[in-house]
Image (cartoon, rainbow, N blue to C red):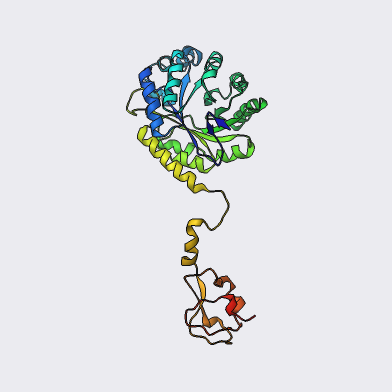
Amino acid sequence: MKIGNKKIAIDKPTLFIADIAANHDGNINKAIDLIHSCAAAGADVAKFQHFSAETIVSDKGFKDLKKKKSHQSKWSKSVFQTYKDASLPFGWTKILKKECEKAKILFSTSPYSFELVDLVDKHISFYKIGSGDITWHEIIEKISKKKKPLILATGASSFKDVELAVKKIEKYKREYVLMQCNTNYTNQKLNFKHINLNVLKIYKKKFPKAILGLSDHTPGHANVLGAITLGARVIEKHYTLNNNLSGPDHAFSMNAQTWKEMIYNSRELEQSLGNEIKIVEKNEMDTVILQRRSIRLIKNIKKNTKLKRTDLTCLRPCPKNAIQPYEIKSIIGKKLKIDLSKHDYLKWNQIKK
């Protein structure tokens, strides 16, 4: 799979998406600053969200719930007003994309209506479908018809929900990333026990056409490292300039420093994962000699002497042509061809057959 100029595969560097989401706070200059900040911190993609409050939430519906729940309980404004304040004017799109090009980073956005899917199409190289739309098969199909790679987040979903959504995507033979996700945005450490990274193993088995990914909203980047270890090659985390700003997404977002730390540690991990083939690695060739034991004599022994177990010991180092300790039984009772001294190591060309 390719996203922009980035090739996504198990043997390629992980793609990191900085989800700016509502952290622009309705200010285009802040949105531009966020693009350049996340690019400098090592992000590959700056992702926004295109929606209007009217096309994503029902004001009456949330008022009928009487009480705000989960992360929304901390919002000072109504749910409808919060979404209205967080909406991104479509007129910003070209400007933001151009700024991404200046920063040498990919621009992307999640469109939350049929109309926006069409409007953003020429500006993006892939689509992201948020967890909340996993059961809205109409928009999944519409996006799948666009002939671009897509990312599907699977937070707050059952396996059946995921299976049905993937079926719609694969119907149109789209390349896709399947992201494990937990949609609790309360930024509590208690949320770690609900992340269930091992679901990625099931996704790999059940959906072999998918690239694995993680959309994460927990503090730090422990989950990111775990996901990469399990095969995820696309990571999405929210990004802010300041975690202390008011707004729905700032508190659980990464900032420039924590993002850099995540990238640094992830790149180290990628180098460490290897290829599943167990060999003596190039950088440990010398330690094969230094740390392994060879069969050595515990005293001087003359030519034609039959070797007994009590004549032998196993000590470091182990030169390349030494007889290995696991072969010790093979030389007991054999005669030496030459005189040897105490602590000489044994070689096969010294042993009579």
Res. 225 in view: yes
- The residue sitting at 56% across, 48% down in the picture is 275
Screen quadrant of the N terminus: top right
Res. 76 in view: no
Screen quadrant of the C terminus: bottom right
- The residue sitting at 41% across, 18% down in the picture is 86
**In front here: 146 or 170?**
146
Classify 279 as above or below 99. Answer: below
* Residue furthest right in the image: 171
* Residue furthest left in the image: 244
**In front here: 132 or 298?**
298
Classify 294 as above or below 20. Answer: below
Classify 169 as above or below 333. Answer: above
| Residue 320 x, y percent position in the rendering | 53, 68
| Residue 255 x, y percent position in the rendering | 37, 32
- Give the number of callouts: 0
| Residue 138 x, y percent position in the rendering | 61, 18
Residue 71 lies in quadrant:
top left
Give left or right: position of 308 versus 265. Answer: right
Residue 211 lies in quadrant:
top right
Give left or right: position of 338 versus 99. Answer: right
| Residue 270 x, y percent position in the rendering | 49, 44
